[in-house]
Amino acid sequence: MGHVFDKKLFELYEKWQRSPEGMLLDQLSTDLILRLLQPKRGERVLDIGCGTGNHLLLFYRIGLDVTGLDASPFMLDIARSRLGHKASLKAGSAEDLPFEDNEFDITTLIFTLEFLDNPLTVLQEAGRVTKDRIFLGTLNSLSLGCVLKRLSTLFKDSIFRKMHTFTLWDLTKLVRKAYGDVPVTWGSVPILPFLSRQHIGRIDKSPEVQSYPYGTFLGLACSMTYALTTRNLLVMEKTKKGAESIARSSCF
């Protein structure tokens, strides 16, 4: 199952989210998520690892039918206090989702894979319950911002100590193992975390810049495709009499 957030982990995560870097990353990653997913009003979305409901609120505000799942009762209590009846919230394991096949149009895992023990199993489960699109959003192992955060954990306690980060190639490999050769689009932000917020806003929102695989946040959207396979059954003639009966019946 991986790390289940308690109060201590939540406080570390919240501290990072409220930092200038965390707020900028939230703004840019939100733009990227919406650009890659292209959600339509009324679609059903499941957010696996919904935490305190940040992305559920985003999806609700643009008119989606939202459901969230998390393994942490502590995080879900906060999500319920924020969302009320705006979302359906369930406690459960990402490896064994309590939902029907194809129940959702969209499934998202945003800052979730980093804390899981079995990401492939989770992706396979996500594919089972998803009719149309899956979005993965993770921190990028190859980004300068992530490298610097990793180094900082040598000197202070940080949420980054608990994370397993990914590269674009890691995510693509997982998707291929889970779903086969499905259509994929991706992007990353911010590419240059050391620039001022004003300059990043102009530069990193460009789709051309987002096509570089070295931003702090990696977003990957894949479209679910389903193939119908058939198996040919061999009909064997067990007796000569049976074969003759078939031949006679074909004459009429």
Image: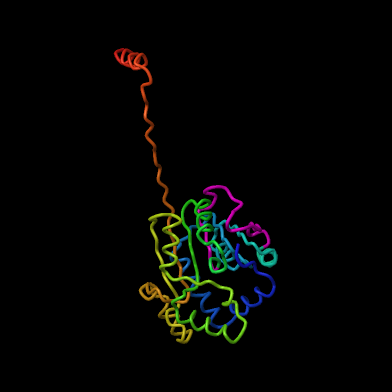
**Residue shown at 39% from the left, 56% from the top:** 182
Q: Which quadrant holds residue 13? A: bottom right
Q: Which quadrant holds residue 209? A: bottom left
Task: Say how many tags the image has.
Answer: 0
Left or right relative to 61: residue 147:
left
Give the answer, above or below, for where 40 lies relative to 15: above
Report the residue that reaches farthest toward the left.
251
**Residue shown at 41% from the left, 66% from the top:** 186
State which quarter of the image contains the C terminus: top left
Q: Is residue 71 magenta?
A: no
Q: Nearer the viewer, residue 118 or 138?
A: 118
Residue 55: x %, y % from top left:
57, 66
Q: Is residue 86 magenta?
A: yes
Q: Nearer the viewer, residue 193 or 40?
A: 193
State which quarter of the image contains the N terminus: bottom right
Q: What's drawn in magenta, residue-wise?
A: 84-111
Residue 63: x %, y % from top left:
55, 59
Q: Which quadrant holds residue 250? A: top left
Q: How is the image coloured?
A: rainbow
Left or right relative to 13: residue 132:
left
**Residue shown at 52% from the left, 49% from the top:** 102
Left or right relative to 88: residue 202:
left
Residue 221: x %, y % from top left:
44, 62
Give the answer, above or below, for where 252 lies relative to 64: above
